[in-house]
Image: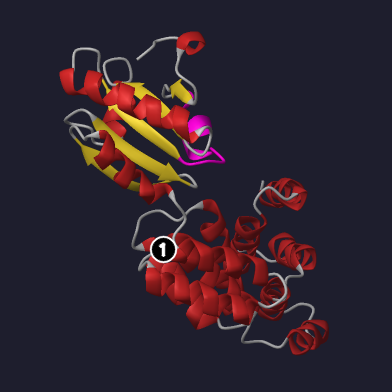
């Protein structure tokens, strides 16, 4: 149980709060996190067993050791109240854990949780199919969910596929399932924002909205309907420009509605350079 990396066993690393995300959550291979302390007798027995198995695995997975006396914040984050407490991570998510001492035979059996199962294989198949055949990919994501109910990656994949095939109710249902687990991850939050745009503007045909706006250039309602239809069609810059013109030309409620329309597009675009440009222009129009 070395405190410095130079004498650590192969494929074993000491982890701190500062390095946890990069070492564990972003690792390309599974990571077994061992919460331990120098004064813990069972930890001193379990630690060498885990270190030996990590060395034997030769990079198939990594052992990350967290001294709870030094890293109380991490221990609290994972609700570690008794040690040794061991958590296995794969693809940045916890897949299994145990508390207490295990024999080497028991550890080998437990480490099977790191091996890809049938649900993982279906997920991989779906990911390959998704760019060209989202309908077929959705079937594979569904199979993965049948094998592992609540599988978040498969649920998100279903939502993406439903969006691409225009099945907005199915996409909304999948995102709602994800939200039951807690705050949406960034990709899912962006997808939810896109869904909101499509639901708000999808009821209006884009060409009809364009013709109505051209026929009534001084009607903010017609201009906002066009902005929503453009956003629903993925024409984000014209949508932003149209909504901005409402903010610039019409006071009161239309101005507020134009601002809200722009904010919805900002949420979908995320870090796109258009966001910085149009945030600046919106601020100028408002203030």
Instruction: Tell me which segment is drawn in magenta.
Output: 18-30
User: Does residue 201 show up?
Assistant: no
Q: Residue at x 34, y 58 (%)?
A: 181
Left or right, residue 272 beside residue 107: right
Position of residue 104 measured from the top left corner of the image (x, y, whole percent): 27, 34
Q: Is residue 282 magenta?
A: no
Which of 1/136 is in front?
1
Q: Residue at x 76, y 52 (%)?
A: 274
Q: How is the image coloured?
A: secondary structure
- Residue 95 lies, with reference to residue 229, above or below; the image says above
Q: Is residue 29 magenta?
A: yes
Numbered disc 1: secondary structure = loop
Position of residue 17 measured from the top left corner of the image (x, y, whole percent): 41, 24
Question: Which quarter of the figure has residue 229?
Answer: bottom right
Q: Residue at x 47, y 44 (%)?
A: 92
Left or right, residue 163 beside residue 101: right
- Residue 77 lies, with reference to residue 90, above or below; the image says above
Dot 1 surroundings within 10 Å: few (below 14), some, or many (20 or more)? some
Question: Which quarter of the figure has residue 206?
Answer: bottom right
Q: Disc count in the image? A: 1
Which of 228/282 is in front?
228
Position of residue 276 measured from the top left corner of the image (x, y, whole percent): 73, 46
Left or right, residue 14 beside residue 223: left
Position of residue 156 measured from the top left corner of the image (x, y, whole percent): 51, 65
Q: Which residue is mark 1?
A: 151
Which of 84/254 is in front?
84
User: Does residue 87 show up?
Assistant: yes
- Residue 202 lies, with reference to residue 111, above or below; the image says below
Question: Which quarter of the figure has residue 177?
Answer: bottom left
**Position of the N terminus by quadrant:** top left
Which of 284/179 is in front?
179
């Amino acid at each position: 149980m070395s405190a410095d990396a130079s004498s650590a066993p192969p494929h074993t690393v000491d982890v701190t709060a500062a390095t946890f995300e990069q070492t564990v959550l972003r690792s390309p291979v599974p990571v077994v996190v061992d919460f331990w302390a120098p004064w813990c007798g069972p930890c001193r027995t379990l630690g060498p067993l885990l270190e030996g198995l990590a060395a034997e695995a030769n990079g198939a997975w990594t052992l990350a050791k967290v001294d709870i006396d030094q890293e109380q914040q991490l221990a609290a984050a994972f609700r570690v109240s008794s040690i040794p407490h061991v958590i296995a991570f794969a693809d940045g998510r916890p897949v299994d854990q145990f508390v207490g001492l295990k024999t080497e035979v028991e550890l080998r059996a437990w480490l099977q949780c790191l091996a890809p199962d049938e649900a993982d294989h279906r997920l991989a198949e779906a990911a390959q199919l998704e760019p060209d055949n989202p309908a077929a990919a959705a079937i594979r994501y569904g199979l993965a969910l049948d094998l592992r109910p609540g599988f978040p990656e498969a649920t998100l994949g279903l939502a993406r596929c439903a969006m691409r095939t225009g099945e907005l109710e199915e996409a909304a249902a999948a995102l709602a399932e994800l939200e039951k687990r807690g705050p949406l991850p960034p990709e899912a939050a962006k997808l939810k924002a896109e869904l909101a745009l499509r639901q708000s503007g999808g009821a209006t045909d884009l060409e009809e909205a364009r013709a109505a706006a051209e026929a009534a250039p001084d009607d903010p309602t017609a201009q906002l309907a066009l902005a929503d239809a453009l956003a629903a069609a993925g024409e984000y810059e014209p949508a932003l420009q149209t909504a901005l013109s409402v903010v610039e030309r019409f006071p009161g409620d239309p101005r507020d509605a134009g601002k809200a329309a722009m904010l919805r597009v900002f949420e979908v675009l995320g870090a796109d350079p258009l966001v910085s440009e149009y945030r600046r222009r919106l601020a100028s129009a408002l203030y």
